[in-house]
Image: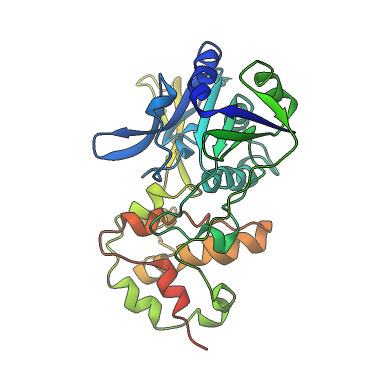
Amino acid sequence: MNTLIDKKDVSKFFDRLKGQYEIVGPVKREEIIAFDKISSFDEVVLDKQSDFPPKKYFLPQKQELFRYHKQKITQKLPENKRIVIMRPCDANGILTLDKVFLDENPDQLYQKKRENTLLFVFKCLTPCKNGFCTSLKTDETTNYDLLFVDIGDKYVVSIGNKKAEELTKNKLFSQIIREGKVNLTCNRNLVNVEKLEAHFDNPIWEKETEKCLSCNGCNVVCPTCFCFNVIDIPDLDLTKGKRIRFWSYCHSKDHTKVAGGHVFREDRAKRFKHRIYHKLKYFKEQTGRQLCTGCGRCIDVCPTEIDMVKIINNLKD
């Protein structure tokens, strides 16, 4: 089902929702665009890609898993209801996180955050500087509650479910039959992905690794990097404490360090190559879904200008 809303009425729509939901979106904070709580829709930046994805609202950078006291374990599940405004690539990134945290053994904390969150997706009108989402078809998404498509002075709004439909039952929206369409074409295209298997031992990996600082910037800004570590923090009396998880980064040597001090990927080139192969090959073989969303943030943030698209496109037979 599709509806129509005037652009001038979108702020009114969000104002009506503020009492029921915490509303989060990409906003300008000093020199960066990041996801944060908003008080008005006018704060939302829609014409530029955010520097960071909305991942932290589903998989926090640091999160308490549970507390323990002797033999008793207690877990506090998130209760606050949210609306998160995002782009299609980031909505597809959350679908990828769903594969990890919901498919086989659902993670209760992640599951509760997903259940309490509505995704309001705004389709992009122009490609990002280093984005290549159209190569991976992640400029389109089915992962939304409401999908907004800009058609000039109005938005065509596609409704994803009954829960979202209830929100549009007011005079600000008018029902229509037409769909909203945006024909987006990225300036960059990712090709040669199918050649990765044949190029596992290509010298290009060693050459590109020479530029890598292992700074983990690409991991931090990626909407789908899901690796984490877990530690227990006991109180001094050792009868109680808490367990937390926090993001872990595959470019770090400690990422594959196990008991006894052995590191499985001590060589930086192995870590560099593993990240790209995991994004474009391994995860898809395991789940049927690409781990990369084509957002291009990893290219934007790299201090030595490592460009995954150029590397893969330059693979030769």
Q: Quadrant of residue 94?
A: top right
Q: Is residue 173 left or right of residue 67?
A: right
Residue appearing at x 61%, y 19% in the figure: 172
Residue appearing at x 51%, y 69% in the figure: 190
Count of numbered labels shown in the rendering: 0
Q: Is residue 25 above or below residue 138?
A: above
Q: Is residue 80 left or right of residue 1?
A: left
Q: Is residue 42 above or below residue 122?
A: above
Question: Percent position (x, y) of residue 52?
Answer: 39, 43
Q: Quadrant of residue 25?
A: top left
Q: Is residue 133 above or below residue 223?
A: below
- Does residue 140 show up? yes
The residue nearer to you, when weighing 111 against 47, is 47
In the rendered image, the residue lying farthest to the front is 153
Residue appearing at x 50%, y 68% in the figure: 189
Question: Percent position (x, y) of residue 77?
Answer: 57, 21
Question: Percent position (x, y) of residue 251?
Answer: 37, 58
Question: Percent position (x, y) of residue 265?
Answer: 42, 65
The residue nearer to you, when weighing 52 against 265, is 52
Q: Is residue 135 above or below residue 124?
A: below
Position of the N terminus, as image quadrant, is top right
Q: Is residue 235 left or right of residue 195?
A: left
Q: Is residue 29 left or right of residue 88?
A: left
The residue nearer to you, when weighing 87 against 76, is 87
Residue appearing at x 40%, y 26% in the figure: 42
- Does residue 68 show up? no
Colour scheme in the image?
rainbow
